[in-house]
Amino acid sequence: MNIPAWVWITTIAGLLLLLAIDLVIVDRKPHEVTIGEAARWVVFYVACAALFGVGLWAFAGGVPAKEFVAGYITEYSLSVDNLFVFVVIMAKFSVPPIHQHRVLLFGIVLALVMRGIFIAVGAAAIAEFSWLFYFFGVFLIYTAWKLATSDEEDEEFKENAALRYVRKVLPVTADYHDHRSFVRLDGRRWVTPMFVVMVAIGTTDLLFALDSIPAIFGLTKEPFLVFTANAFALLGLRQLYFLIGGLLNRLVYLSHGLSVILGFIGVKLILEALHGNSLPFLNDGEPVPVPTVSIEVSLVVIVGVLTITTIASLVKAKRDPETVRNVS
């Protein structure tokens, strides 16, 4: 796809408008988000993503639209697993319920900016070094194995280097000061725990991007689709947090389902890399005649795995309550 500059500008402006609407309507007055309110916003953001997909189909054709849908579903489903860590972060920092939406909003905006940079660098690297798809494929298969075999009993959050740096160079107040990130006390400017937890959400989400970005590059090589799929998934993530927060601990097989998806995309990446091989030490630099996986098959596998995983998780949680994991 050859994406004109005005399309990029219009799309980013539209995403910023969605954020502005959210700020004006939801964050105008801090409050505890209800399930009904969260449900309406989730439907709204999913509808926005669907309309964007329809627009792609109308103006760019079926293939880009299908790639966007597959990427969006994959990013959204991977983001659900991120919510477990978000719950733990909120609990660790004792974020008041009325301020949790604001924390997620600014934390995810930070994550979106950093992901945009990550996507741009990744797209440039892939264009220059096609062999990176071999690396991405192996990395996703390894990540899938780690996810499937990891022990989910311990959901302890550990501060990363960015948070440790913030605490080292900036004075942090002991208590929250409403929704403010900065306050002046005794003539000195301080940052509040609100600022720290925003950094925690944003930087932690960037770590999750280490597997989600390669995964979506396995579904589409178009940076515009990679960015928009990530953006729409992140925009809807905040409301999903409040909508299914109580349901998260029942998705006992979610990690296994996501590991299947990541492993599938990893294999897909390696097959495509072999199909377009240019490495001189492999088949004399010629493409290897291997089958590739179409975007239609990818969609069926992704949706099918998520459906089976969700149903099996809820059935298991109902029959065996002891399997429900603690995310508080």
Image (cartoon, rainbow, N blue to C red):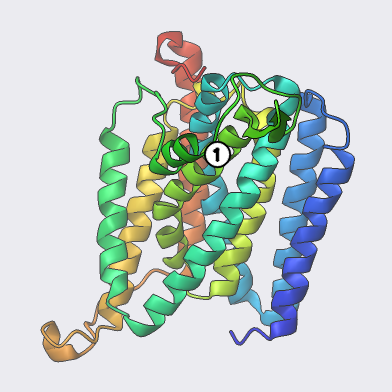
Disc tally is 1
Q: Which residue in the rendered view is the most extreme toward the front?
A: 187
Q: Quadrant of residue 146?
A: top left
Left or right of 294: which side holds 39?
Answer: right
From the top left corner, tell me how far across and down residue 97 is, in percent.
71, 21
The one nearer the camera, 104 or 276, is 104
Residue ID at (40%, 15%)? 323
Left or right of 125: which side holds 97?
Answer: right
The one nearer the camera, 65 or 95, is 95
Question: How many residues crowd mark 1 within 10 Å: few (<14), some (14–19), many (20+)?
Answer: many
Q: Is residue 291 visible?
A: no
Q: Which quarter shows the N terminus? A: bottom right
Residue ID at (28%, 57%)? 139
Image: 193 above or below 26: above
Check disc 1 and give the amino acid type.
Ile
Image: 277 above or below 266: below
Image: 133 above or below 110: below
Q: Secondary structure at mark 1?
A: helix
Image: 140 above or below 9: above
Q: Quadrant of residue 125?
A: bottom left
From the top left corner, tell me how far across and down residue 8 is, in percent.
69, 76
Q: Is residue 248 visible?
A: yes
Residue ID at (69%, 84%)? 5
Name the residue that disc number 1 marks: 201
Left or right of 91: which side holds 10?
Answer: right
The one nearer the camera, 191 or 325, is 191
From the top left corner, tell me how far across and down residue 193 is, in percent.
60, 28
From the top left corner, tell me how far across and down residue 164 is, in percent.
42, 36
Residue ID at (48%, 64%)? 118
Left or right of 200: which side holds 259?
Answer: left
